[in-house]
Amino acid sequence: MSVVKSNATPNQTSFQTTQLNLDLAIKFDASLSDFSSPNWESVVDLVRQLHAGLVSQLYLYGGQDTGKTHLLTAICESFRDMGYSAIYLSLRDLLTLDPMVLASVENMDMVAIDDIDAIQGYPDWQEAVFHLINRHYENQHPIIFASRVSVNALDFSLSDLVSRLAQAPTFELPSGRDREDRAMILQSILARRHWHFDERITTYLLDEGPLQVGAMLAVLEHIQPMFSNLGRSQVSKTVILEAFKQIDDKTLLYELKDLNLTEEDSGFLDF
């Protein structure tokens, strides 16, 4: 299904546009098994409650690159594995479309909405999200939200939307500063994807790479092609040093991004 763009600006309210369709593909290769460390047990338990229908909403928040996107796509995949329809949407990516695009996903079994803080200052989008929540409540379908800030910190003009979001169980994602936590997640992902890295590289990534889980995984994705066609015996000192350099370079970019010393770059993904 293709995305159809609207001529309306993000601040225009239009409820008479044609039905819009969204790409239902999952963005990243992710699984709940990736989050195998103790610091993530509580949120994985909440997801299991979503599976069982014990809760219908979930609100996750954490700083930039703390793993929100990876987790949301993993949750979507878990619902798809159970035979349900599920979609991941980033509101930050959709702001150039008409808010009525959300009407396309009202009948999905599960919707994961990332970057809900991105619609601060967009009352038309806030109203569209509010209607989407109501429709999912009526259909008894779960809906999940992720943000860089807590519900109380959202600067929304639509107070009813804040009230709706406040009803959801809330979980603050781990910061990633726990090395053991990052190591367990890293090893889980490597095992699931059948990726084999020299231990010197994974150790360097954990010790010198980004502290945030999402940024660490992005760096992992970046260096993996260097080793995809190499056997273990072919990983030379030169290759390892180049991997170290790539880790350093990407880590520096994420640190600059985190300090707001660089402009927003579409090449960066908030994982």
Image (spheres, grey):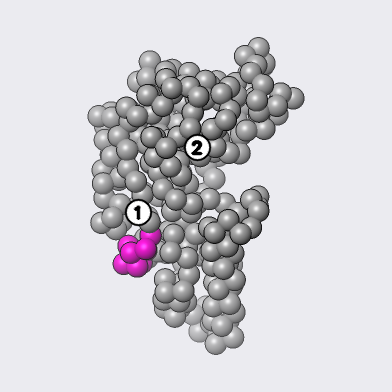
Please name the residue shown 45% across and 31% down the image: 111
Callout 1 amino acid? Pro
Callout 2 amino acid? Asp
Q: Foreground: 150 or 72? A: 150
Local secondary structure at mark 1: loop
Mark 2 or mark 1, which is nearer the start of the sequence?
A: 2
Q: Which mark is residue 117?
A: 2
Q: Foreground: 196 or 258? A: 258
Residue 179 lies left or right of residue 231; in this view the side is left
Which image quarter: residue 234? bottom right
Residue 191 lies left or right of residue 106; in this view the side is left
Q: Residues within 10 Å of mark 1 (few under 14, many from 20)?
A: some
Decide whether residue 232 is among the magenta residues.
no
**Residue on which disc 1 sits:** 174
Please name the residue shown 38% across and 35% down the image: 152
Residue at the top extreme, as displayed: 16
Name the spot of residue 1 as percent of width and height, x first: 62, 31
Local secondary structure at mark 2: helix
Q: Foreground: 178 or 31? A: 178
Q: Which residues are magenta?
A: 176-183
| For residue 155, above or below residue 267 | above
